[in-house]
Image: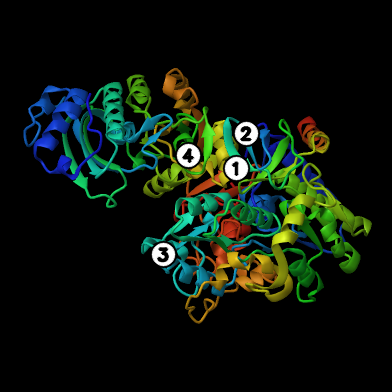
Amino acid sequence: MCLAIPMKLERRDEFEGVVSLDGISRTVSVMLLPEAEPGQWVLVHAGYAIAVVDEDQARETLELIGEHADAMRDL
Amino acid sequence: MTPGDPYHDPAAVRSLAAAIRDESAGLRDPLTIMEVCGSHTHAIARAGLRSVLPPNLRLISGPGCPVCVTPVDWLDRAVALVRRDDVILATFGDLMRVPSSGPTLEAVRSEGAPVEIVYSPRDALDIARAHPDRTVVFLAVGFETTAPTIAAALVEAEREGIRNFMILPGNKTMPEPMRLIASDPAIRVDGFLLPGHVSVIAGWETFTFLADDHGLPGVVVGFTPVDVLRGVLEVVRQRLRGEARVANLYGRVVTAGGNTSARRLLDQVFVPAPATWRGLGEIPGSGLDPAPAWAHRDARNIDVELPEPHEPPGCRCGDVLKGVISPPECPLFATACTPESPVGACMVSSEGSCAAWYRHDRLGSRGARP
Amino acid sequence: MKAPQRILLAHGAGGRLTRELVERLFLPAFANPELEDLDDAALLPELPPGRPALTTDGHVVDPPVFAGGDLGTLSVNGTVNDLVMAGARPLWLTWAVILEEGLDGELLATCVEGARRAAEEAGVRIAAGDTKTVPRGKGDRIFAVTAGLGVVPPGRGVNDRNIAPGDAILVTGTVGDHGATIMAHRHGMESTELVSDCAALNGLLEPLWEAGVPIHALHDPTRGGVATTCNEAAARSGLRFVLDQQALPVAPPVRAVCELLGLDPFYLACEGRALVWLPEAEADRALEILRGHPLGRGSARIGEVVDSAPGHAPVEVRTVSGALRPLDLLSGMDLPRIC
């Protein structure tokens, strides 16, 4: 359940940070994510950053999907 | 939905759907897969994914819609609270139209009661800051994903000395009802699409009991059409191989152990408690109550008079939530109960399975094609 | 232009303060001979040939000033567009405001200037107006009420009953920019890229008429967005519309707001976009003309008209999986959700 979307962490202090996506930015709490660093993508839910996006994993998934899509386009 | 986004690439969707059709042809028995999470229900309906699955694969919705499983007496209390003249209610938009024993929050607001819709528990804190003479009660619903944000808001209120901020505790946790469903002989489920964002907090290891104790496959997936179809394909493959394990296909945000800071905060603020789930009844240990040190933030300690709770007659939300029936099998579906005038909670929330079926699948289920 | 610091109840009482407001604020802004007579009713010159079209509209928006416009621009453009959607050339407007006691005069001045600029850009005149005030707490800062008068030139006409199977459905730009701008503001989001699409559409659509494009129907997808407008038009036409999810143009910041707040772009309001129904064979030519105008660069074909059929909803969307799903009217308000 629960809507959450990846946004880029622009800056942060101990409690708050600013996240952005496609020209939209919002102040969120980073209390649940003390390890997140500016420049990283974080998952945002209800005004809180709740996870750091693992870029290696994300890339791997995209490659797998790309193979599926290419297979279909080649048909 | 996003053109150019691989997770919504029609070619990838077609390719995965074809793979699912090909491979599931080798299944001996039809498969019933439960998508536990309401956001999955919403995503599946929105992308029309049911219609690309072969007839021997059935997707059913589980109890992971927080609005749908919230019992009427809890809503009755919310309504009673906002009718006091010293309380402002702050809520996620999702709860506004859920039926209580009396009026909905939307109806009480139209009578002039202060019900504020917020995007974040922190917005509710801002309202408390702006109205020091009132008590702001935040309606705390949601599972493991949302509960830590509410715990964090309570900690922030404490840190900043915001005394007039309280919650009406209604947060719940997922594993307990899933254990119930997995072990109920009346409910036929062969595998689970596991809630991706609950897993972000709780960690995918939380769900290994499904495989270990019940021999059922579970796949943690994200919320795009491609994510969901990859999850379905994984369940099919595990069944074909005679396997049952928890697979994590949402590794970009989900780890084995989840978010430890969030879990620590949950343990600090909440204690497990019995909770009533609409349709499932009381489940021990499935609720989150404020720990004794946080009792002063618990709005259940505000004195209100409550009506005798009554569930709408004829409503079969309970059976829908357990996956015993699909929405169209309820006699009220699309007749007495529609999104315009919902009888049960499952028709209200956009991620409720009845609303999702009504909005996106009610014609598709009859085989409508262009 | 001079606005009082704060609006008092007396500004709407018809006495000296009302007169000052009219003379210092409204008259200089809307300057035209028909208004300046300040008579009980404005006497207009004779209308050009064609069928007169008349519309009225009430306007409330929170916040009253937003990126890309304000209550003034919104009220004028909204009224102009209602006329344009009927195939009319807009000519005259009335503009009345209801002000809450204590309103910041600067806000009023901003909205008056917005209305002035919008009227100028749309080529219409504000020929009559009115001011009323309500006690503090009895209104939300500023409301505007308008009427609009235009003329449908001979030989022109749009009607949902003209919509025919095989028609293409075009939209004149990205959808939901206005709705997303408002929602983002209400829920603590900031953006330099998110701007309301609020605009008058006569300048964009007139070239289509001049080129002889046989437009069957026109609508502006305001409240309730493309989904609601299409449902209303489908009901009146007795036909079925099939929209393509992938073809719906949505600007990236609008998409981001939707994902963050759980909103659907199909339901977000536009204030400067039109939906156009016309024969399929004319679609490419129309798109080329529309895209040649600054307001129409993002024009796209988003769907087609087919015969209604049992088991189908009046408006359906072809999803990413190729399946059709019904696109219903919005039930209640489109609220931000987290679940």
| Residue at 46%, 71% in the rendered image | B80
Instruction: Tell me the amino acid under the disc marked 2.
Output: Leu
Q: Which residue is mark 2?
A: A21
Q: Is disc 3 in the same subunit as disc 1?
A: no
Q: Which residue is mark 3?
A: B107
Callout 2: chain: A
Marking on residue C247: none
Callout 4: chain: C
Closer to us: B328 or C19: C19
Q: Is disc 1 in the same subunit as disc 4?
A: yes
Residue A58 visible to an observer of this rendering? yes
Closer to us: C243 or C299: C299
Across and down, in percent, residue C24 comes to: 17, 27
Across and down, in percent, residue B164 comes to: 51, 59
Callout 1: chain: C
Q: Which residue is mark 1?
A: C259
Q: Which residue is mark 4?
A: C185
Mark toward the viewer: 2 or 1:
2
Which element is circle 2 on?
Answer: strand
